[in-house]
Amino acid sequence: MSAAATRADVAPILQVEGLRTWFPVRAGVLQRPAAWVRAVDDVSFEIESGRTLALVGESGCGKTTVGRSLLRLVEPQAGRVVFEGQDLLALPRAALRPLRRRLQIVFQDPMASLDPRMRVRDLVAEGMQVHGIGADETERTERVAQLLARVQIDARHMARYAHEFSGGQRQRICIARALAVEPRLLVCDEATSALDVSIQSQVLNLLRDLQQELGLTYLFITHDLGVVRYLADRVAVMYLGQIVEQGETEELFRAPQHPYTQALLAAVPSLDPARRSAAAVVRGDVPSPAAPPPGCRFHTRCPRVFDRCRVEPPAAFATPTGESRCFLSDPTEPRARQERAS
């Protein structure tokens, strides 16, 4: 059976359509919105059950806001977030509580998400108490011990505080805490970027093992393309609040279609002189998300820009590797046909 046929049999656990999250820039005595930061602006993607989608891009592109918007830790202004058949954005907050159990997040900084006054046993068991998991404290303690062992933390240390552990161990505790409520989907927001390389690889191996054991689905938010290639089944590349390209990981790495994706991959250190000489050149700085440029948002830095890019926002065009928000992927664009012919 082909990979495409296999994927067709797997239903998406999460579908995001037209997600928009803007933040007001307030000014004046009355603090009225004078402008809007378009952190997330018309983002769409889906994740199939049991698979990993990596959301990648430069710092400030909006990828963390996407993760927080899915869980409504920040409130989007528009769009749909359909998780297991229910639109999370259409639900009142009270109705979200049982769903939060199945959709958890692991943050970049474990110390910021672990209460320093609580012992590890209570940190991991907190979600179980909130959602009524476990018959009593004894059963919950036994489950905490099992979870800690699963993330390779000695259960005898559950009476310690978070500051008594290393950074890698604290992140393992955060993973155990998320797993305690038996989620279906984990949002991992730069979950390994603050760790040393050797510890990072251990945590990545742990996440991969847990996915295989428990059938977890991951949205993995990162800027590290090495991590992406190791862990992700699919990749979505963000630039200035929008997804500019997405596709299967190996296909996208082999033949990136969008000039921004090409630039990101060319910037990865390589010993191959041919690859270094073929590196795409990206000019200038990232524009402000409070005042994105007209037309294609990447046109101010794109080495292949032409007139149409400056005035018309590109749609997401189908490509051999997925889809790309670039006129060079438009089959009706004369410039694209000219480039392909040359």
Image: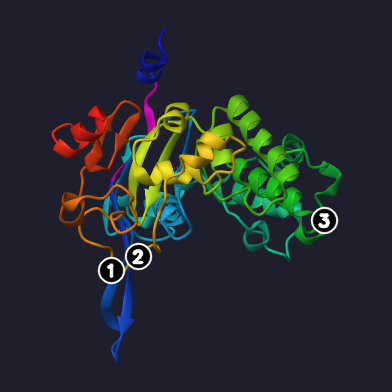
| Image location of residue 273, percent across then percent down | 56, 37
CB contact under 8 Å: marks 2 and 1: yes
Residue designated by label 3: 160
Which mark identifies residue 287?
A: 2
Q: Residue furthest bottom?
A: 29
Residue type marked 1: Ala
Which one is nearer the viewer's eye here, 337 or 117?
Answer: 337
Over which residues does the magenta segment extend? 10-17
Q: Residue at x 29, y 89 (%)?
A: 28
Q: Residue at x 75, y 53 (%)?
A: 120
* Residue at mark 2 to residue at mark 1: CA–CA distance: 7 Å
| Magenta-colored stretch includes residue 167 | no
Residue designated by label 1: 291
Residue type marked 3: Arg
| Image location of residue 271, percent across then percent down | 62, 37
Which of disc 3 and disc 2 is earlier in sequence?
Answer: 3
* Residue at mark 3 to residue at mark 1: CA–CA distance: 48 Å
Q: Nearer the viewer, mark 2 or mark 3?
A: 2
Q: Is residue 311 above or below residue 103?
A: below
Which one is nearer the viewer's eye here, 304 or 23?
Answer: 304
CB contact under 8 Å: marks 3 and 1: no
Q: Nearer the viewer, mark 2 or mark 1?
A: 2
Residue type marked 2: Pro
Which mark identifies residue 336?
A: none
* Residue at mark 2 to residue at mark 3: CA–CA distance: 46 Å
Which image quarter holds the C terminus?
top left
